[in-house]
């Protein structure tokens, strides 16, 4: 029987950083679903599909090969990691994620991928929609200021020129869009464990989650 962990939360709440460590320590596959929406955004923008019909968009997406290897995003074999992290693509991904046909396609792709897989998956709708029966659900949050600080650091490390205040505003806007969209809005699943990461180190968050894994996996065995 497979073991599945859902980690949800707003932008830059530390989901991927933590999920990656959890995956390594527990021999689980790590999937960060945000990369898919970023890939869809890049594909649509780079191929002038912004005005196309849903059918044309989906049929185009079906022919693309999207891969995430060692935290790098490849589309048809080309590395788009840096471009995928731009604020323009972040915004566009968030807009696309509100569209019913994009979400229907994404749900299908992801659910097929994780069947029978031991996995830790992060996103916005993992505990609520994608894996409602996950063995463990975590909801990570941090204040907007703390998340903007982390995101500024991350982008600077990628060599990008960024303004903290612009990032802060972008995060506010993305939170609003993600939480208020009609389909699969970002929210804590009723049975998810809430962890506020503001004053916690990465290791402290990992340790807190590991305790829950040890409890739930024991029950599984
Ligand atoms: O996680 P990340 O910031 O890379 O995600 C980019 C965007 O993709 C988010 O702002 C959100 O709108 C969308 N997303 C989503 N559902 C997911 C993962 C990401 O709607 N499961």
Image (cartoon, rainbow, N blue to C red):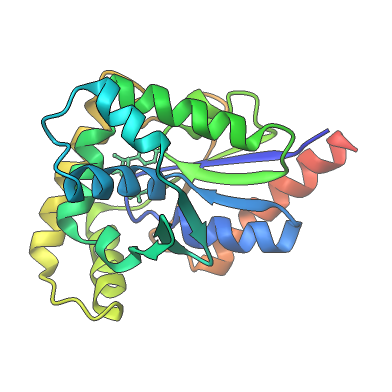
Q: Answer with left or right where residue 214 lies relative to residue 179.
A: right
Which of the 4 quarters of the picture holds residue 162?
A: bottom left
Q: Quadrant of residue 103?
A: top left
Q: Is residue 83 above or below residue 189?
A: below
Residue at image location 25% in from the left, 63% down from the top: 83
Location of the C terminus by quadrant is top right
Locate ligand 1 by image quadrant: top left
Judge whether residue 137 can be spotted in this image. Answer: yes
Residue, x 44% and y 61% (percent of image)? 77
Where residue 147 appears, as percent x and y from the top left, is: 29, 59
Q: Residue at x 85, y 35 (%)?
A: 219
* Residue 188 visible from this viewpoint: no
Q: Nearer the viewer, residue 114 or 61?
A: 61
Q: Position of residue 164 (x, y in %)?
A: 13, 68
Q: Position of residue 213 (x, y in %)?
A: 73, 47
| 109 is higher (above) or lower (below) than 39 | above
119 with respect to 6 (left or right): right
Count the numbered circles shown: 0
Q: Nearer the viewer, residue 209 or 155?
A: 155
In the image: residue 168, left or right of residue 106: left
Q: Is residue 116 above or below residue 66?
A: above
Q: Quadrant of the N terminus?
A: top right
Q: Residue at x 23, y 26 (%)?
A: 180
């Amino acid at each position: 029987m497979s073991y599945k962990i859902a980690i949800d939360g707003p932008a830059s709440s530390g989901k991927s950083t933590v999920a990656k460590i959890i995956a390594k320590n527990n021999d689980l596959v790590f999937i960060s679903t945000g990369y898919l929406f970023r890939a869809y955004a890049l594909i649509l923008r780079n191929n002038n599909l912004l005005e196309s019909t849903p059918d044309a968009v989906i049929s185009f997406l079906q022919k693309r090969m999207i891969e995430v290897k060692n935290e790098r995003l490849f589309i048809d074999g080309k590395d788009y990691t840096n471009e995928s992290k731009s604020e323009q693509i972040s915004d566009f991904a968030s807009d696309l994620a509100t569209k019913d046909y994009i979400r229907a396609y994404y749900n299908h792709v992801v659910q097929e991928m994780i069947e029978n897989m031991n996995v830790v998956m992060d996103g916005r709708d993992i505990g609520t929609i994608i894996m409602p029966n996950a063995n463990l659900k975590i909801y990570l949050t941090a204040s907007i200021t703390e998340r903007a600080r982390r995101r500024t650091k991350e982008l600077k490390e990628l060599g990008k020129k960024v303004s903290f205040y612009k990032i802060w505003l972008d995060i506010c806007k993305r939170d609003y869009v993600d939480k208020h969209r009609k389909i699969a809005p970002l929210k804590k699943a009723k049975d998810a464990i809430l962890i506020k990461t503001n004053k916690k180190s990465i290791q402290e968050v990992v340790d807190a989650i590991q305790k829950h894994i040890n409890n739930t996996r024991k029950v599984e065995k």
